Amino acid sequence: MLKAINYGNIGYSDSIDSKIRKEIQKIENRLQNSKNPEFEVWLKNNNPRTSAGPVEFVCSISVKYLKKRIFVTKASLSFQESFHKAKKVLEKLISKKFDNKYKRKKIHLYSM
């Protein structure tokens, strides 16, 4: 379940909101065995409009599941790129932890 999307100094946008909700829903569908994973997303623009230089967007995603919290932060020159980088890293971390938790151990039988 998506607990909150914090827009920081970016400002609310319907298109950003719907995109984030769709992508988080895809991750939630993979975690069906987990009891109610809680997601939080933070969006931030690192450079204020008054300073010179390129604009850098920061996206942080936090998920709480299996009694643990995973927090990922990525930055990029575009919002979509920073969100996708953070989502990819989060999916890798989740798949490692989730697969290790529920993977059956191989039993080797030796003949005598």
Image: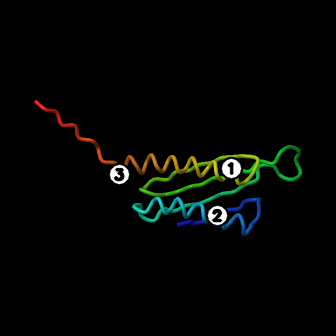
Is label 1 in a helix, a strand or a loop? helix
State the separation of the CA atoms marked 1 and 2.
15 Å
- Residue closer to the observer: 2 or 24: 24
**Image position of 112 (left or right of 82):** left
Image mark for residue 12: none
Q: Nearer the viewer, mark 3 or mark 2?
A: 3
Task: Kindly check if marks 3 and 1 are in contact, taking CB atoms under 8 A apart as contact.
Answer: no
The quarter of the image holding the C terminus is: top left
Residue beneath the point at 51% across and 47% down: 92
Residue 108 is situated, as x and y percent measured from the top left of the image, at 22, 37
Residue at image position (52%, 67%) is 1
Q: Residue 12, located in which quarter of the rendered image?
A: bottom right
Instruction: State if disc 2 and disc 1 touch (CB < 8 Å).
Output: no
Going by the image, does 16 lie left or right of 103? Answer: right
Q: Are marks 3 and 2 in contact (CB under 8 Å)?
A: no
Give the residue number, with chain letter if any, for mark 1.
Answer: 82
Per the model, the C-alpha gap separating discs 3 and 2 is 30 Å
The residue singled out by tag 2 in the image is 5
Using a 10 Å C-alpha cutoff, classify the residue at mark 1 as few (fewer than 14 neighbours), some (14 to 19) or many (20 or more).
many
**SS of the residue under disc 3:** helix
| x then y, percent, for residue 72 | 59, 49
Give whichever of discs 3 and 1 has the lower sequence position: 1
Q: Position of residue 8 (x, y in %)?
A: 72, 59
Amino acid bearing label 2: Ile
Q: Earlier in the sequence, mark 1 or mark 2?
A: 2
Which one is nearer the viewer's eye here, 14 or 48? Answer: 14
Task: Please give the residue where the numbered disc 3 appears in the rendered image.
Answer: 102
